[in-house]
Image (cartoon, coloured by chain):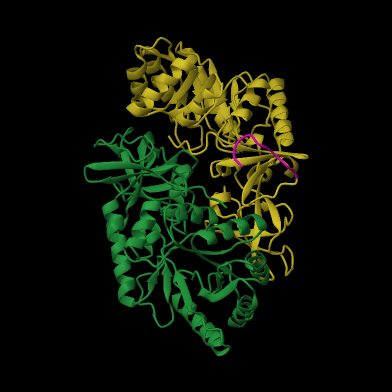
Chain colours: A green, B yellow
Amino acid sequence: MRGMTRLEFPLSFDTPCVVIDPDVTERNLRRAQAHFDALGIAMRPHIKTHKLPRFARRQLDLGAKGITCQKLGEAEVMAEAGCGDIFLPYNIIGAAKLDRLRRLAEQITVSVSADSAATVDGYARHFGNAQKLLPVLIECDTGGGRCGVQTPEDALALAGQIDAARGLRFTGLMTYPASGKREEAERWLATAKAVLTGAGLPPTIISSGGTPDMWADHDASLITEYRPGTYIYMDRFQMTAGAATLEDCALKVMATVVSRPTPTRAVLDAGSKALSSDTLGLQGYGLITEHPDAMIRSLSEEHAVVDLPSASNTPAVGEVLSIVPNHACVVSNLFDDVYLVSGQEAEIVPVAARGRVS
Amino acid sequence: MRGMTRLEFPLSFDTPCVVIDPDVTERNLRRAQAHFDALGIAMRPHIKTHKLPRFARRQLDLGAKGITCQKLGEAEVMAEAGCGDIFLPYNIIGAAKLDRLRRLAEQITVSVSADSAATVDGYARHFGNAQKLLPVLIECDTGGGRCGVQTPEDALALAGQIDAARGLRFTGLMTYPASGKREEAERWLATAKAVLTGAGLPPTIISSGGTPDMWADHDASLITEYRPGTYIYMDRFQMTAGAATLEDCALKVMATVVSRPTPTRAVLDAGSKALSSDTLGLQGYGLITEHPDAMIRSLSEEHAVVDLPSASNTPAVGEVLSIVPNHACVVSNLFDDVYLVSGQEAEIVPVAARGRVS
């Protein structure tokens, strides 16, 4: 069943499985590209959500400047698939990975991030004698509390180190802003831009990201590129965040009712191996589109336990339901293959960049 | 690097990766087998934890009666690897899966569970003309609140249906007891056994499971077989439950410190794609063995954010740390390969039954 086979419709879904509507992804991609075109901000979509070469190429065809990958292994898959400009917003650490980065940089345009002198030292050691300079952006902690330099002054010090290193080129700033803290992030970045520009190291690129805030009226005089990921599929979290409607959700996990132990309990065959345990702060583990009032109360690896709002004979054992997961990206990482289903046509596609942990 | 290659030591771990100590797994397997041998209860280990044919075969070599798989896809892999007696404690639903089950049952000894008339009907339709009877156990909800018939009387009704169906053989009862509710589960099963025996349908097998309660003094006059899974690797949850010590934990996720944004924060390259988001009710997402007082506060897909107990320069960027995950089973499902490292020898082994979602 694996590969690019075109399938007969109706499909007999062997659940759990992932079904994606390519008409919805196309609409989502076009809408986002139009939004950023109108703002005058470059798109650099994050492929971690779909992990599929065809969608990465489509994002580029529609006008994206390049793509974003979180892992070298993902970037290697996407380079192989013809993507020529990849940003890795990650501190690439250790000789094994730096050797791979060097090889990748000899094939395509690669840029990376750094938030410490140790990371920059590693880049400089591996790129000091490279033909092409390695573009390095500084990761800034603008409120997200993950990686990143803590102050604009720290950014300036690191930019100086990058600028002075053989083989590297200081390119700009990047952040992954905390959801709902966009304005705080922009103030941080504006200050850093002023500090760097004043010191003769103006950032060429200022890169932000995140689907929840993507529809905001970003300031193109500050933000030069944006890295949304989830927008291609959307999910229950994005619906809750107001970034999407149910109609925008392109990815669904199909699951079969395997048990009806009580009149108010149903058990489905999609557990954490299909939906992941991600809650992203939400109650429950996904939206059952046929029973929106039902609550996926708990997951074990191969079971979802569902509370129905009242005693009911439906859904019955054997019924197949479609679930909008809390978080689409992690679902893509759990399936070797996904179904693309458009109208009367369906196709099974291997998730080429799944499981690229390093 | 993939396959049965024997590696040079010391390994240059390209993190995140999974390292397993086969000396510890061997000790864990032997100790558990001895425990159940002493009790006079058969072992039927659940392979979902390791998903590796070699460990399944080892469990059988050490005396297990058979193995347990949660999914048909796992059972197909294990049958291919030489396991001849597999129990699927799951309601197998739908023509596609029932056809696969029939094919598997023609190759090896397979037994299944059911908790509804609809599930039994499906088995009967697909096995009515089979050469061998399909052994069916009734799943009982003894307090776990997942699948299972709700009362011993419901078990009796279902046993009658199985007994009357062509192609099926009523074999007994199974439960996955809620952790800490072992005595409640045993009371339930004892009542059901009496009801069934009184009606002329005595259960031949009464199967229980779960690593947290495995060391208890199970009553062999009631429980005939036990299906522990996690005991081969153990994990942070089992340590907290008192079922294991740190020395019993055979599986660790190796991660590199990629950022030290503040004196009390470290960021590692093992996120939910490596550790999973499973908390199992614990605070934090794993135990960093080198820094047991540190707290893995949050995960995103490729980052773990760690709070250090006090300001410190260690761990430094580039250091490799080993993490005992909250839940070992889900980690096995996230990696295509694992390293087995014993003393000076190491080997990379593909996780053959990973990702078998259906």
The quarter of the image holding the N terminus of chain A is: top left
Segment colored magenta: B1-9
Residue B27 relative to residue B266: left or right: right
Q: Which residue is located at x 43 percent, y 11 percent?
A: B132
Q: Residue furthest front?
A: A131
Residue A39 relative to residue B243: left or right: left
Residue A243 relative to residue B8: left or right: left
Q: Nearer the viewer, residue B351 or B23?
A: B351
Measured along the vertical axis of the image, is residue A258 above or below residue B304? above
Measured along the vertical axis of the image, is residue B297 above or below residue B224? below
Please name the predominant secondary structure of the magenta segment in the image.
loop
Residue A297 appears at what percent x and percent y? 44, 47
Q: Is residue A327 visible?
A: no
Instruction: Find residue B161 and report its image quarter.
Output: top left
Residue A165 appears at what percent x and percent y? 64, 75
Residue B226 appears at what percent x and percent y? 60, 26
Residue B262 appears at what percent x and percent y? 66, 71
Q: Is residue A76 visible?
A: yes
Instruction: Find residue B180 and report its image quarter.
Output: top right
> Would you say residue A326 sits in the magenta stretch?
no
Q: Which residue is located at x 47 percent, y 58 percent?
A: A280
Q: Nearer the viewer, residue A74 or B281?
A: A74
Q: Residue furthest left?
A: A344
Q: Nearer the viewer, residue A56 or A147?
A: A56
Measured along the vertical axis of the image, is residue A282 above or below residue B210? below
> Would you say residue B2 sits in the magenta stretch?
yes
Residue A138 relative to residue A350: left or right: right
